[in-house]
Image: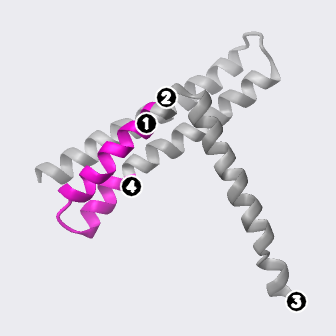
Amino acid sequence: MVFRDTFDFGRLVKAFFYSFKGLKAAFINEVAFRQEVILSVILIPLGIWLGENGIERALLVGVILLVMIVELINSGIEAVVDRISGEHHELSGRAKDVGSAAVLIALINVAVVWLLVLIY
């Protein structure tokens, strides 16, 4: 049965709990993620309220969620780099800097999208 192999409800439940465990770990261990959660609690309802139609609401909310996604990926990269070695290495520093730059670009994206949606 191909469908049975493709759709394993037990695997989906386990994946959900692993994902929740990751969110909890990020919230406990990452100050930046906690700050972004607090901002999202404010900005997501605000974006839903300020958006005039579904597309605007999706853009205003979506860019906030994108920042959180990028922050989670950045935190994962940093954890792996720190796990591999505690000593400074140029490539380790570069990996962390590039992850941080991705978060910065996601935050700039928030500002640009919110300005464009709300001004025009």
- Position of the N terminus, as image quadrant, is bottom right
Q: Earlier in the sequence, mark 4 or mark 3?
A: 3
The amino acid beneath tag 4 is: Gly
Q: Magenta residues, as a range? A: 35-62
Secondary structure, mark 1, is helix
What residue would you read off at disc 4? 62
Residue closer to the observer: 116 or 22:
22
What residue would you read off at disc 3? 1
Near mark 3 (Cα within 10 A), the count class, few <14, some 14-19 or many ≥20, is few
Contact (Cβ within 8 Å) of mark 2 with mark 1:
yes
The amino acid beneath tag 3 is: Met
Contact (Cβ within 8 Å) of mark 4 with mark 1:
no
Q: Earlier in the sequence, mark 2 or mark 4?
A: 2
Residue at the image position 70 percent from the left and 29 percent from the top? 79
Q: Which image quarter: residue 28?
A: top right
Secondary structure, mark 2, is helix
Query: Which residue, as the protein is rendered here, is positioned at the far left?
Result: 120
Query: Which residue, as the protein is rendered here, is positioned at the far right?
Result: 1
Measure the alpha-carbon separation of dots 4 and 3. 37 Å
Secondary structure, mark 3, is loop
The percent coordinates of residue 56 (x first, y second) are 25, 61
Contact (Cβ within 8 Å) of mark 1 with mark 3:
no
Near mark 2 (Cα within 10 A), the count class, few <14, some 14-19 or many ≥20, is some
What residue would you read off at disc 1? 36
Residue at the image position 83 percent from the left and 84 percent from the top? 4
